[in-house]
Image: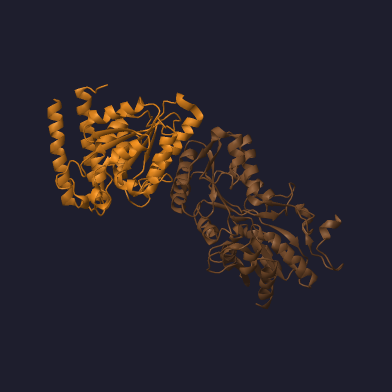
Chain colours: A orange, B brown
Amino acid sequence: MGLTDSKIKELEATANDIRITIMDILEDAGSGHVAGPLDMADIFTVLYFHTLNHEPKQPDWKERDRVVLSNGHICPVLYTTMAYAGYFPKEELKTLRKFGSRLQGHPHRDFLPMLETSSGPLGSGLSQAVGMALADKIDHGLTSSRRIYALLSDGELECGQSWEAAMLAGKNKLENLVAVIDRNNIQIDGAVEDIMPLEPLSDKWRAWNWHVIEIDGHNIQEIADAFDMAKSTSGKPTVIIAHTIAGKGVKEFERDYRWHSQVVNKETEQMAINELRTLGGKITSEHQ
Amino acid sequence: MNCALWAGRSQANTSSMLNPELKLNTKIFDKDVAQAPIRQGFGEGLVEAGEKNEQVVGVCADLTESTKMDLFAKKFPNRFIEMGVAEQNLASVASGLAAMGKIPFISSYAMFSPGRNWEQIRTTICYNNRPVKIAGSHAGVSVGPDGGTHQAIEDIAITRVIPRMVVISPCDSIEAKKATLLSAETDTPVYLRLAREKTPIITTLETPFAIGKAMSVWTSSKPKVGIIATGGLLYHAIMAAKELEDEGTEVEVMNLSSIKPLDREAIIALAKKTGRLVTVEEHQVSGGMGGAVSECLAEEYPVPIQFVGIRDEFGQTGTPAELLRHFGLDKEGIKKGVKIALAK
């Protein structure tokens, strides 16, 4: 079920615009996380502009798919993608991390009720998604076409709770559950594989009865295909291990764990935005 | 007046008695008073809540029979989820269930839930505003021979400090059943503190119960001390009150099963009526029910208070009676607390 070239270019351009906005709002905020939001922009774009069954103008629509962002610290990409999708005005993104803002430093449903979960402390998002998938299965059995998406970081797989949730989902054959792992191999203290090796990662998930798909997390077609495969998977939950480049799009940030979270000053912001605009120009010219 | 209600009286000119308005168990002073585990009331209440509302689901971490969730699991197998020994997952999966409209009850030993999974309860249930009901069984030292690892005596402190959490510590199995049924109808997270061993039945089906209401179960016209007790120790407090009456000291005993929200009005009224208080709980003095009472009174109407509770120690192996005696939580310990309060 391939996307047309035109659709791919459109999604690439959207992802690039989202990255530019992320840099803009992080500089305004004066703090926040950089690498994860940038490297997840492609996946968020495909999810919100191609895969999800949702109604941005009616966020409490009952039949919607659910998106659980487990590693809440990458919320700049969640907020920006939601604004681009029409959930709230893009102008509001400028309030990120400011007093009284609906866009709290880590997502909080009290302030922005259209969020499916509040999150921040790592390792509990998959459990919540499992709970949602179980509820849907209790209500609709195998007839439900709803999908519950859990977006996870690789670092948070060091939390034992992630594996408690993985076991339960595998045992209950939750085919309505799709986990996406941002396999960027960075965390606060260094490279994930140095801090706490996760490999062989796909074998671990297979052992708990999960359908495993490994993709290039920046290839729009691969991302869309993986979500489509997950939709047609039966008898087991799906995990998409998305190999990403931390800080994707800005050479100075890429693969550097120190950009997990670092203050973006005006100069860095301009450098990053210029680089992203150049990239955006290339996408547009290729498209034309 | 039912004569049995006056069973605590030894002198015709005193006016202390079980509060007749509460329609309490009139056989409470009998040697063979009926007993049942507080957790049993939870199990029965959960079945009834499940019959009333099909959105009620049960989730347990490998302690289904011990926490009496087995009654629900047998009746509604499709609405019961076995988690295995995974209490962190237990709390967060329940949050996800609630996000889809379910009313999840999760059960384990209090030491593990809310003990082990406190942060998941704080963030994924309370911060997330999901109405999950947490049943923590085997709370207190009266778990007995299992020893200190299994005796939760910090759980009131760690639950009542979380915004939105309702904390209920029923005094007997009948009250536990009522609390379970009411919990299913509230839209907030609730912590139900349950105990393992058999406890004398104090209330009846007719006894009123409401979340946020404290009631005097043993009343007196001229009480010198107000005893506020929570959980199964309420029985010991009533027994202490009866003996104190015989010894010439009138007291009033309040059942504070609803620790949060706190019935500030009733507590202030008791403080005004008695002038001094004793709080009684199977819990650390730090952060417990007595702490909640003193936070209220320090602001509103300061009176001398003596805390009957555990003072910065862990539990240990023993029979429930031995442990209650060791920690000064039984009738004698409560009477001692009253004497200290009177001397203040």
Give residue B24's position: percent from left, percent from top.
76, 53
Q: Nearer the viewer, residue A233 or B318?
A: B318
Image quadrant containing the N terminus of chain A: top left
Give residue A42's position: percent from left, percent from top.
24, 35
Tell me if I can see residue A113 in this picture: no
Numbered label tally: 0
Asked whether, in this view, residue B343 is left or right of residue A26, the answer is right
Q: Is residue B84 above or below residue B223?
A: above
Give residue A188's position: percent from left, percent from top.
26, 53
Q: Is residue B238 above or below residue B128?
A: below
Could you say which quadrant of the image residue A288 lies in?
top left
Could you say which quadrant of the image residue A116 lies in?
top left
Asked whether, in this view, residue A197 is left or right of residue B137, the answer is left
Give residue A55's position: percent from left, percent from top.
38, 29
Q: Nearer the viewer, residue A264 or A167?
A: A167
Residue drawn at 50 percent across, 31 percent down: A138
Q: Nearer the viewer, residue A193 or A176?
A: A193
